[in-house]
Structures are given as structure tokens and as C-alpha cells.
Image (cartoon, grey):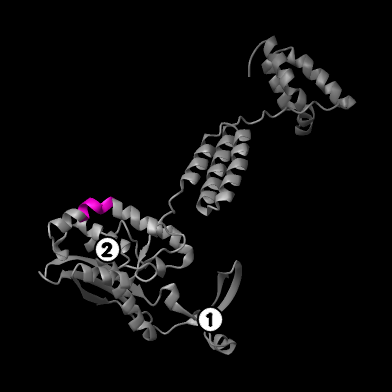
Amino acid sequence: MAVFAGAIHSRICNALTSAVRAGDDLGRLSPRSDAALVAMLIRAEVARINTHYGTIPGTPKPTLYKPGAEVLCVTFRIAPIYRILDLSTDLVARFRVTCVGQHQVSDIMLGEGVGECSSAEEKYKWRASVCAEEFDLTPETMRRLKFAKYNGSVQKKVQVRTEAADLSNTVLKMACKRAMIAMTLNVTAASDIFTQDIEDLPEELRVQDAGDPAMSPLALEWVAKANAAPTADDLAAVWKAGVKAINEAKDAVASNAFKAAVTERGTALTAAQPAPKAEKPEPQPLSTAAAEILADMEVLADDGAEVFAASWASLSKSTQNMLAGHYDGLMMRAQKTGGAT
């Protein structure tokens, strides 16, 4: 994270210096200077990684935690004010909270954020059953068998529904937390540095919510080579060399992006190839009776296309199938004689 903080610091150095020289009060900095001060807190380790913020695996930006939001509010002299809307029912505890950021010195309302939480969310809705007997005695609509991945294997867990009343306070606190973090990001203009609430999502949903991780220069290089491969043989060569280079770098993001690019390019190259021409089946040897019918049809073809077409239509389906390999030749012969059909 030192590289991340250093890059942020260099980007905002001029703005921060200007704010300090001007003697601006921390509560009156411009949004641009606000972002500079946030980055300075990171660089000076006032905001500590894994305590105030952290990077969730599979996400492109650090996530702002509640302790980090509190540090930013104290730094910028922001007092959070909560407006709570109770949307609970008999079966579900649900709250929507609006957190308004008020400047402690001037009482100016600086901005707000909205957060919501419900006991119907996956992590609150279910709990592990205490024992097999509890699971068996629970109504079928209030229990389930949960499949989850752990250490590369799939595990089955027996779970029962939770009581909404037991979670009411927890759900309210979580809604307040989400609203406060949203307000802090809005008021301090720190959304380009942090994301929010990713740690609250199930692992399988984190990448979709946060966006795809940024590709490294190595990934961009090999994806470009795959997209530029003119033939399937060239693509195979690119694949072999790219896999070797990416495996040596141990870049998982590059590996996934490269595989997707090769697959897409391979599909495009296959679609661009002309379809092979279907070969007409060779005429099969005819029986004596079929040979005689064929000889008659050759004579009729000499009388023109109309006569031949009418005669062909009068044949039985089995006979037509038997002579199908000769039909095109007979029709061409009839058309040369005269007439069309």
C-alpha cells in the first residue's frame, strides 16, 4: 500500500501545499483539497491499513471501514446526524438511515449518505443449527441445506432461520454504519480513493460489485497479442508463449484476461473460416429394374425439361430415392434439350 499512498501523494502535492500556505481551516477546504488531505492521512499512516481501510481480495480499490470514516470525520470536523426510517415487519427487521454531515464549527450541512440493512440479507437471515435435532424439528420453510466453498472443497451446512427481533439492533447499527461511510465519502470527495461496503458482500458477489480488477502491463501486452493473431496457428503460438510468461509472473488477473482473449479470438477465427463444401454422394450401383427405369428417364429427358419433370413426379418415392444421385444430370440434359422447370 506504500506505492498506492505515494502515487496519491504525488498527484495532490500541489493542492495540499496551496491549502496549507493559505492557512485554510480543515473544515473549510475545497473538495480538491479534501481529497489531498485524505491521501496525506494515508501517507502519514494516521489512517492505518487493515484498521481504518483495507483491500478486499478481488477488488480494485481499498475499502473504507467505519474506524476510517470516523478518523476522516474528526479530521474535517464533521458531525454525523442520523435520520432513521423503520421499515420492519413482523418477520423482518429493516432500517433505512440517512446520515447528514454537519460542520461542527459553522453548523453548515455538508452532504449526506443513505444506508439500508435488513435481517433478510443472507448473512443475517440464517444461522447454523445447534444440533441435528433442532434442524429436524424446524419447519421445512425455516431451514435449509447450504452449500459453501472452503479450502477448495464444497461443504454442506445445516442452517435454520434467525429471529428478526434478535437482530434488530445489529441491523440498525449496520444501516447507520453504511450511511455514515457513504456520507463521509461524499463529503470528503474520497470516492476515487475508497470504495464502500465490499466487506459486507458475500465473496462470490464482490468482483461483480466492485468492477473488474485493473489489468497489469503484462496482461495488456498478451491480451493485445492474442487479439492481433491473424491465424489459428499464430494464436496457438501466442498462447504457448503467453502462458509461460504469465505463469512466471504469477499474475492471476493477467491469466484470466489472457485466457478470455484467446478464447474470444479463437471463436472469431473459427467463424471467419469458410464452411467446407458438402460433397455430393456418388451414385450407387443400380439394380436391373432401376437401370431400366433410368434408361427410360434418359430418353424422356431428351424430350425436354417439362416432359422430364412430369415423368419424374410420376415415379414413386422409393424409385425417386433410388435415382436421386442421377437427378441433377438428367435435369441438365433435359434443360439443354429445351424447356425449363
Helix, strand or loop under label 1: helix
Residue 327's spot in the image, x, y percent? 73, 23
Residue bounds of the magenta highlight: 11-16
Quadrant of the frame with the C terminus = top right
Helix, strand or loop under label 2: helix
Rate crowding at label 1 as few (under 14), some (14 to 19) or many (20 or more) other CA atoms within 10 Å.
few
Q: Callout 2, which amino acid?
A: Leu
Note whether 60 is above or below 217 in the view shown: below
Residue extending furthest toward the left:
106
Q: Residue at x 44, y 75 (%)?
A: 123
Q: Quadrant of residue 5?
A: bottom left
**Total numbered circles:** 2
Q: Nearer the viewer, residue 324 or 254?
A: 254
The answer to whether residue 176 is left or right of residue 262 is left
Q: Nearer the viewer, residue 243 or 90?
A: 243
Q: Magenta span has 166?
A: no
Residue 209's spot in the image, x, y percent? 40, 60
Residue extending furthest toward the right:
288
Q: Nearer the viewer, residue 143 or 290?
A: 143
Q: Residue at x 68, y 11 (%)?
A: 336
- Disc 1 designates what residue? 140
- Disc 2 designates what residue? 185
Q: Magenta span has 12?
A: yes
The answer to whether residue 196 is left or right of residue 83 is right
The answer to whether residue 321 is left or right of residue 224 is right
Residue 180 visible in image: no
Rate crowding at label 2 as few (under 14), some (14 to 19) or many (20 or more) other CA atoms within 10 Å.
many
Q: Callout 1, which amino acid?
A: Glu
Note whether 141 is above or below 285 in the view shown: below
